[in-house]
Amino acid sequence: MSDTSAAVDLDSENENEVSVAEVVTEAFFNAILDQADDTSAGKSFYTREAFLGALDSYSSFAGEGSKEDRLREIAAFFAHVTHETGHLQYIEEIDGASKDYCDENNTDHPCVQGEDYYGRGPLQLSWNYNYAAAGNSIGFDGLNNPEIVATDVDISWKTALWFWMTNVHGVLDEGFGATIRAINSIECDGGNTAAVNARVEYYTEYCNQLGVSTGDNLTA
């Protein structure tokens, strides 16, 4: 694990305000990216600048609660991003095309023949209904062009933040374990203890770097 020395002063003049850009420094971001293989697709795709640009559409990210709450949200988000992408190595899910992520019962968002809805982006957006909803919110055709999440870095980061704010942000006060369940419930209740432990390890590392406690209820 890398120490980026990005600890934040919790006694600053503005009691709760957090500047994400000042927390997610180049050192913090690059400490994750530097662990990606140099030949990996994500190494030249994911950028800090694109992440910060995507934040313009999601001002509530790390913008609510105490300063500690806000820092924990940043730590939690990047813990999951690190796990989902293998330190920002992967843009697309490994062997994703061999898996069926079409929920045919979701008639509001019917799958398009020839398109695949496997995991893509920093939080590995999956399923036809998520692609459709993310596209409607962000402004792309998620059902007909899911591939754009793996080719447009700005849209890619926006899908991760969209999913986070839609499905994860609201359970942060229940502890990190609740965020695991919101992202991949199949890992919970003994489904994949190793994956849960890996997410917790990343989260703990990032909390330590940011100088904030992890809070309770770490596992799910």
Image: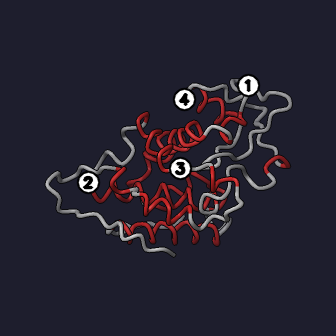
Residue tagged by mark 4?
A: 138
Distance (Cα) linking label 1 and label 4:
21 Å
The residue closer to the viewer here, 167 or 199, is 199
Image spot of residue 125 (x, y percent): 64, 44
Where disc 4 sits, the SS reads helix
Q: How many marks?
A: 4
Question: What amino acid is at disc 4?
Answer: Ile
Residue tagged by mark 1?
A: 107
Q: Residue at x 47, y 39 (%)?
A: 54
Image spot of residue 19 (x, y percent): 30, 49
Residue tagged by mark 3?
A: 47
Mark 1 or 3: the one toward you = 3
Report the colour scheme: secondary structure
Residue tagged by mark 2?
A: 66
Q: Earlier in the sequence, mark 1 or mark 4?
A: 1
Q: Quadrant of residue 136?
A: top right
Q: Earlier in the sequence, mark 4 or mark 2?
A: 2
Question: What amino acid is at disc 1?
Answer: Thr
